[in-house]
């Protein structure tokens, strides 16, 4: 029995795709102790540095003293506590929706919401570069799933036009997590209105990053009120854990009754809600935090463009440096670690075959000096070996699902 698993592991390794855990022995700041060595962190989604913010820590400690460490049951049994509802109200106000519903993570949210909204006899249209949790959600539903080519609006319209399904759900990442590009939400909203479909936008990398005071990409593009389901995580820019769906009262009530990952899982610990409430409060009263993130992104991309002209000129703090092969990608990752820069290599199946990459992320906590250090190191490590760095748009997007 063991041998079979060992053989499969050897096969994964032969492709250069064997994964191993690295150990962080410090808190999640820009400088972390990784496997015993101090390095500069350039691959965390802690975009605003809130994961170790003193005010969040204090809020969590106070909540634990008042409400304890666990919720003890699912929300529908005895786990629905004051802080869950307080956070949901806070998110609904923040997102400009009637209501919000918490899930235990973004993964849980996508896994629960998609099959709840679309089932047998329905159609789901899903961008081919959507996050794995969306893919898994579509697989769990018993709907017909059409995976459309990345950002291909014409293809999408063709599918909508021919559809005779009871219900149609379009689901997309707002900001694509591995490429740092943006979904054409205006066009998607127009299409779903024209064809009477439901639109669900995953704002995992837009929450706390885009829009007024971090309200997200739907708000940034002036589409508040026109997207039925906005999902986002509390684990990335908001520095905590868990996720939300911001939506109407009716859809919230429907999800409470039908989303299995909501119904059959223990509610988040109340202290986790306290940190998210504090995070939303902080980004509303300190807009300079998000401004710092954007000025860091501008600074880094300006430098980066000099040797990698393909970098997307947007506000997104995700910068893919596409290498191609998995072995090569991990070699570059190790070379950077020798220079005390940590950018994790990302390989299939997280990205399509042949597009392994370093996924660099910038945060508000980096100093210009640290950004400069990273730029220099990345430039040296990639040019020393005269790598062929690929532009995103020239890569034929591969099938992921
Ligand atoms: C990270 C991520 C998720 C999952 O969120 P978690 O809270 O980390 O489970 C979902 N969608 C996208 C686009 C993500 O990047």
Image (spheres, rainbow, N blue to C red):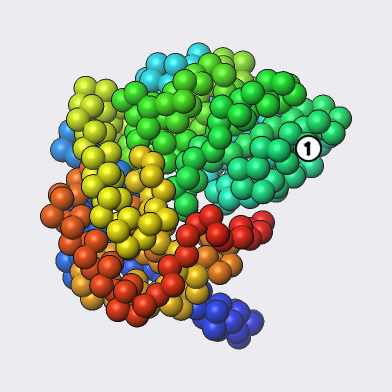
Name which residue lies at 62% across and 30% down. 188
Badge count: 1
Q: Left or right: 169 with respect to 342?
A: right
351, above or below 65, in the image: below
Question: Which percent across, then down, holds residue 334?
Answer: 32, 75
350, above or below 120, in the image: below
Question: Which percent across, then down, holds residue 44?
Answer: 32, 53
Q: Left or right: 159 with respect to 43?
A: right
Q: Is mark 1 within 8 Å of ligand 1?
A: no
Q: In which quarter of the image is the N terminus?
A: bottom right
For disc 1, the marked residue is 159
Question: Which percent across, then down, holds residue 201?
Answer: 55, 33
Question: Which percent across, then down, holds residue 24?
Answer: 26, 62
SS of the residue under disc 1: helix
> Residue 69, located in which quarter of the rendered image?
top left
Name which residue lies at 55% across and 79% down. 15
Task: Count neighbours of disc 1 (C-alpha within 10 A) and say few if under 14, some if 14 to 19, many if 20 or more.
Answer: some
Q: Quadrant of the C terminus?
A: bottom right
Nearer to us in this view, 61 or 205: 205
Q: Left or right: 206 with respect to 126?
A: left
Nearer to us in this view, 132 or 299: 299
Name which residue lies at 18% across and 58% down. 372
Residue 81 visible at all = no
> Residue 271, located in which quarter of the rendered image?
top left
Name which residue lies at 47% across and 65% down. 390
Residue 338 visible at all = yes
Q: Left or right: 362 with respect to 75?
A: left
């Amino acid at each position: 029995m063991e041998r079979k698993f060992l053989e499969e592991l050897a096969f994964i390794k032969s492709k250069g795709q064997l994964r191993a855990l690295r150990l962080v022995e410090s808190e999640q700041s820009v400088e972390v102790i990784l496997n015993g060595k101090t390095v500069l962190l350039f691959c965390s989604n802690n975009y605003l540095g809130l994961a170790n913010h003193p005010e969040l820590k204090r809020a969590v400690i106070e909540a634990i003293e008042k409400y304890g460490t666990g919720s003890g049951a699912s929300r529908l049994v005895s786990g629905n506590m004051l802080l869950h509802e307080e956070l949901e109200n806070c998110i609904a106000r923040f997102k400009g929706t009637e209501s919000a519903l918490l899930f235990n993570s973004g993964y849980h949210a996508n896994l629960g919401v998609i099959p709840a909204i679309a089932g047998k006899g329905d159609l789901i249209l899903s961008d081919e570069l959507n996050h794995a949790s969306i893919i898994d959600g579509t697989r769990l539903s018993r709907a017909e799933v059409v995976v459309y080519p990345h950002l291909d609006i014409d293809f999408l319209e063709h599918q909508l036009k021919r559809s005779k399904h009871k219900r149609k759900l379009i689901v997309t990442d707002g900001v694509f997590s591995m490429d740092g590009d943006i979904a054409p939400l205006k066009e998607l909203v127009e299409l779903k209105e024209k064809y009477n479909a439901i639109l669900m936008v995953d704002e995992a990398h837009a929450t706390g990053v885009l829009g007024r005071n971090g309200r997200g990409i739907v708000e940034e593009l002036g589409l508040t009120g026109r997207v039925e389901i906005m999902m986002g995580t509390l684990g990335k820019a908001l520095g905590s854990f868990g996720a939300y769906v911001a939506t109407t009262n009716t859809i919230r009530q429907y999800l409470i009754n039908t989303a299995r990952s909501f119904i059959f899982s223990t509610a988040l610990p109340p202290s986790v809600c306290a940190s998210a409430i504090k995070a939303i409060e902080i980004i509303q009263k300190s807009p300079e935090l998000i401004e710092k993130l954007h000025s860091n992104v501008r600074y880094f991309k300006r430098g980066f463009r000099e040797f990698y002209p393909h970098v997307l000129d947007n506000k997104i703090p995700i910068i893919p440096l596409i290498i191609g092969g998995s072995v090569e990608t991990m070699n570059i990752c190790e070379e950077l670690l020798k220079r005390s820069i940590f950018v994790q290599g990302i390989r299939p199946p997280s990205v399509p075959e042949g597009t392994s990459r370093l996924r660099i992320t910038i945060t508000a906590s980096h100093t210009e000096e640290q950004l400069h250090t990273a730029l220099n190191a990345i430039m040296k490590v990639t040019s020393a070996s005269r790598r062929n760095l690929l532009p995103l748009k020239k890569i034929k997007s591969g099938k992921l699902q």
